[in-house]
Amino acid sequence: MVVFKPEMTEFLVFDLEAFVPPMDRRKRTGASLAVNAFREGHTLLGGVVYGGRPLTGEVVQDYAHYWMWREGGEKEVVTALYRVFAAMWDGVKDKKMIQADPVVCGVGISTFDMPFLLTKCLQYQVAPPEEIYNTIGKCRVVDLSVAGIGFVPTQNPILHPCSHNQLADALLPERARKPTGKKVWEMMDAKEYGAVEQRCEGEVREMVEIANRMLLSCRYPRSTV
């Protein structure tokens, strides 16, 4: 059983955005996720991070923004994001193995955000490969798109991850509907950097609230099976 020591319990909610060149947006077959860190021109734009030590009330990353146009380029933003993860591990370097590892949370992060960031860190050699794996690959991942399956009414014939919109419709009925992720590409085409930042921060704020409501529901279930 995992032990949660307040000063060593790190929890991070984040969302990354990537750019996909126009020629790769037109595909009509294959995986639904168009981005691929190994394809030319597929760029990590940056993202927004919220996190800290929730059991002590300490907020370390208060919807912090990391973007290419702020940091100076893709390599710089990848390095800055890597340092966020490294700082979490540094904060728990003296923890016992039974104590909680840093937890990262978001929608779809097991499919896109985490593997994309890990790959970019390796490509830019921001640290030795084994250190990158320890820093990015060993975080405990709570992908809300999977964790939320039981919260979303569905007629799917199999278990399938939920979208951000499905989660928000079920748990945040008062919010405005989120546009498709492809909207970011259009904003980038138009160089609307402020709009990209605003949209991403809005998503992370919703993710924080979705995670909070999931946790509250688990603590006080309306019914038991």
Image (cartoon, rainbow, N blue to C red):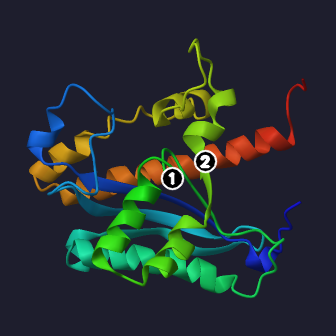
> Regarding mark 1 in the picture, which secondary structure is present there?
helix
Residue toward you, 70 or 117: 117
Foreground residue among 211 and 174: 211
Please indicate, yes or no, whether residue 209 appears anywhere in the rendered image.
yes
**Percent from the top left, x then y, of residue 139?**
61, 65
Q: In the rendering, which numbered label is found on residue 102?
A: none
Circle 2: element type: helix
- Residue 218, compared with residue 41, is above or below; it is above
Q: Amino acid at mark 1?
A: Arg
- In the image: residue 127, left or right of residue 26: right
Residue at image x 85%, y 44%?
219
Q: Residue at x 60, y 67 (%)?
A: 138
- In the rendered image, residue 179, in percent from the top left (x then y), is placed at 33, 35
Q: Residue at x 28, y 79 (%)?
A: 76
Which quadrant of the figure has residue 94?
bottom right
Residue under numbered circle 1: 205
Give the quarter of the figure containing the C terminus.
top right
Q: How many marks?
A: 2
- Front-lying residue, 27 or 52: 27
Judged left or right of residue 202, residue 74 is left
Q: Residues within 10 Å of mark 2 (few under 14, many from 20)?
A: some
Tags 2 and 1 touching, CB below 8 Å: yes
**Which picture quadrant has residue 168?**
top right
Above or below residue 84? Residue 67 is above
According to the image, label 2 marks what residue?
A: 209
Residue 83 in the image: x percent, y percent? 46, 81
The N terminus is located in which quarter? bottom right
